[in-house]
Image (cartoon, helix red, strand yellow):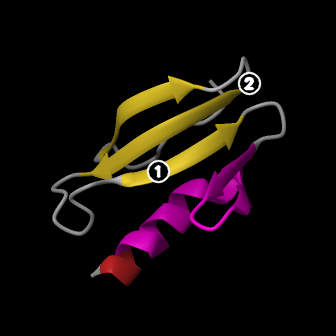
Amino acid sequence: MVFGFEDPLWSADLSTWLSPTRVELKLRKYPGHRAPLGLTMIVEYALRIAEYGDGSHIELARLESTLEGMLDLLG
């Protein structure tokens, strides 16, 4: 496994492989009221980074905390 959420309330609703090492993930966290449409990330496994929003990059080790921060901003 390259990446796994510590919090089991996260789920991937959709995964679309863009290349053998790049996958676009549509993510949600239960109960889903803060981001009902979900959050979209592109994960580049070979580089161990994720791309989000305006094209910003984050290390996979910090992905879950970054997603939590994004949800906090959404209220």
Residue 21: which quarter of the image?
top right
- Relative to 32, residue 74 above or below: below
The x, y position of residue 4, in whole percent, is 53, 37
Residue 44: which quarter of the image?
top right
Dot 1 corresponds to which residue? 40
In the rendered image, residue 52 lying in the magenta stretch gets the answer yes
Helix, strand or loop at label 2? It is loop
| Side of 63 where 32 appears, left or right | left
Q: Which amino acid does label 1 sit on?
A: Thr
In the rendered image, residue 59 lying in the magenta stretch gets the answer yes
| Side of 23 where 70 appears, left or right | left
Extreme-top residue of the structure: 20
**Residue 21 - label:** 2
Q: Earlier in the sequence, mark 2 or mark 1?
A: 2
- Image quarter in which the C terminus is found: bottom left
Helix, strand or loop at label 1? It is strand
Looking at the picture, tell me which residue is in the foreground, 49 or 51.
51
Q: Which amino acid does label 2 sit on?
A: Thr
Which residue is located at x 37 percent, y 71 percent? 71
Q: How crowded is mark 1: few (under 14 residues within 10 Å), some or many (20 or more)?
A: some
| Residue 48 in view of the camera | yes
Which residue is located at x 33 percent, y 78 percent? 74
From mark 2 to mark 1, how far is it between C-alphas?
Answer: 17 Å
Which residue is located at x 60 percent, y 56 percent? 63
| Residue 4 in view of the camera | no
Q: What stretch is highlighted in magenta?
A: 49-71
Which residue is located at x 16 percent, y 65 percent? 33
| Side of 73 where 48 appears, left or right | right
| Side of 43 where 34 appears, left or right | left
Looking at the picture, tell me which residue is in the foreground, 54 or 46.
54
